[in-house]
Each structure stands twice: as C-alpha cells, then as structure tokens.
Amino acid sequence: MGFRAVFLGPPGAGKGTQAARLVEERSPLHISTGDMLREHRSKGTELGEQAKAFMDAGKLVPDELIIAMVEDRLGGVETGSEGGEAGASPDQSWILDGFPRTLPQARALDASLATPLTHVVYFRVPQDVLVSRLSGRWTCSSCGAIWHERFKPTRSEGVCDNCDGALKQRPDDRPEAVSQRLEIYSRDTEPLLDYYKSRNVLCEVDADRAPDEVFSSLTAELAAS
Ligand code: AMP
C-alpha cells in the first residue's frame, strides 16, 4: 500500500520543499491547498476572488470554501479519476500539504476519506527560525520554484536559476503578514497535533536541519507504518 499523508507544521517549516522532493522520487499526488488557491487566483475564478483578501493578509480562507475545494479534489483521487493511470491504483500515494489547518477541516477530512490517513507528519521548527526563513523567501513567477535570500540564493538577484523567470515575494511572505500567519498557526492549527496524536497517526520530523537530512527522516517515517 502507498501512503496517504498529511504534512502538518507552521508556515516556513519546509513542507512544500519536502513535498516537491518526494514527488520527484516517489511520485505521490501532491495536493497543496495553498497552490490550488493560487491557481484559482491566477485563473480569476470566483473562489480565487473570494480567497484573495484572506490570503494576502495572512489569514485563513473560511473553512467551508477550503473544505469544498479539497473534497472535490479528493473525490477524484479516491475514485481514481485523477492522477492518470496511477490514480486508479490502490497503491497511489498522496500528500495533503497545508490542509487541514483547523479542527473543523480535520473532522471534515476524516468524514470524507474512504480509507483512513496512514501518516500525519509534523514538521517541527522553532519560531525564531520560521521568521527568518519566511521573511527572505522569493518565488519564481514563472515556474513556482522557491528561493531564499540567505539559505538558497539564485546566481543572479531576482532571476530564477531554473527558468530565468522573475522572482517575486508572495504578499503573505511580507513581514506584517508573516507574524499574523504564525499567530494563526498557533491558535488554529497547533490543536491538530493533539487531535492526531489521539488517533495514533502522528509522527514527527525535526525540520530545523538541512533539507537532505529532513528528507531522510521523512522517508524513514513514511516507510514505517
Ligand atoms: P500556504 O501556501 O499553504 O502557506 O497557503 C497560503 C495561504 O492560502 C494561507 O495563508 C491561507 O490564506 C490559504 N490557505 C491554504 N490552505 C488553507 C487551509 N487549509 N485553510 C485555510 N486557508 C488556507
């Protein structure tokens, strides 16, 4: 059987970076609610319009909007109509990255899954490290690659090494939104740790390390059932 995992952790913990690497090596479906919302915005959908102000201010998009979006996507994954041929296989693994972020979202997820989660991976990082990670983060406007002024700089300032696209700072990576996101994380998302601990699916990765080290701990956790 493959894994059906939730990546849980504060913004800046490296969930997206680790998910991207896992996709390269293991080809799970990567379901990132942040990416899905950004795509809705760039296409100018109604959901994208509704989500815009919440996102730019570093606030959570209301539960009912997010839950409907994820249920729609997971419905396709679970019936095998999404993810190409692999989607039809019971071995197809998937990762939910950035969802759930509140208790109502976690309960809705439990209710909508035909087969339960295999892992909830908590990426642990101290708060002061998160602030410095988030505040220097730049995203390629063309290919979506994530760079960092100090930890992962590009060869030429403001230009993506992969595709020469222009780098931009996500509005929610600006300092005023960063502290708001971290506060909301402690208030709304941290309670999920106890929720999943009591369901015996929680495991923990020390994410305050180099990405390679985090990745080997992550794959070890996913290999354990
Ligand atoms: P992320 O890329 O995961 O940091 O998400 C970017 C923004 O999208 C968040 O700051 C929220 O505004 C919104 N968002 C993403 N996932 C969720 C979620 N599960 N619940 C509510 N809002 C979300």
Image (cartoon, grey):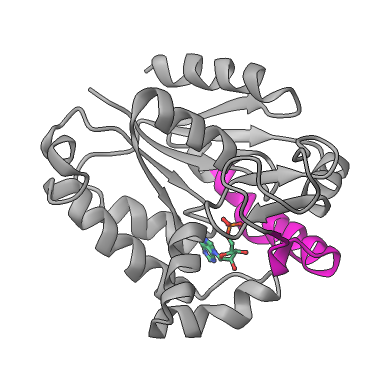
- Foreground residue among 52 and 6: 52
- Foreground residue among 159 and 28: 159
- Name the side, left or right, on which 125 lies relative to 15: right
In the image, residue 122 above or below residue 180? above
> Which picture quadrant has residue 153?
top right
- Name the side, left or right, on which 19 lies relative to 165: left
Magenta stretch: helix, strand or loop mostly:
helix
- Foreground residue among 68 and 154: 154
- Foreground residue among 202 and 181: 181
Q: Position of residue 46 (x, y in %)?
A: 40, 85
Residue 220 visible in rendering: yes
Q: Position of residue 174 (x, y in %)?
A: 80, 65
Residue 200 visible in rendering: no
Question: Which quarter shows the C terminus?
Answer: top left
Question: Which quarter shows the N terminus?
Answer: top left
Q: Position of residue 142 (x, y in %)?
A: 54, 57
Q: Position of residue 33 (x, y in %)?
A: 46, 58
x 72%, y 54%: residue: 186
Residue 186 lies in the magenta stretch: yes
Ligand 1 shown in quarter: bottom right
- Name the side, left or right, on which 24 lies relative to 34: left
x 61%, y 72%: residue: 55
Q: Which residues are magenta?
A: 167-194
x 82%, y 50%: residue: 136
> Which picture quadrant has residue 67?
bottom left
x 62%, y 25%: residue: 205
Residue 125 lies in the magenta stretch: no
Query: In the rendered picture of this protein, how many numbered marks are placed on residues?
Result: 0
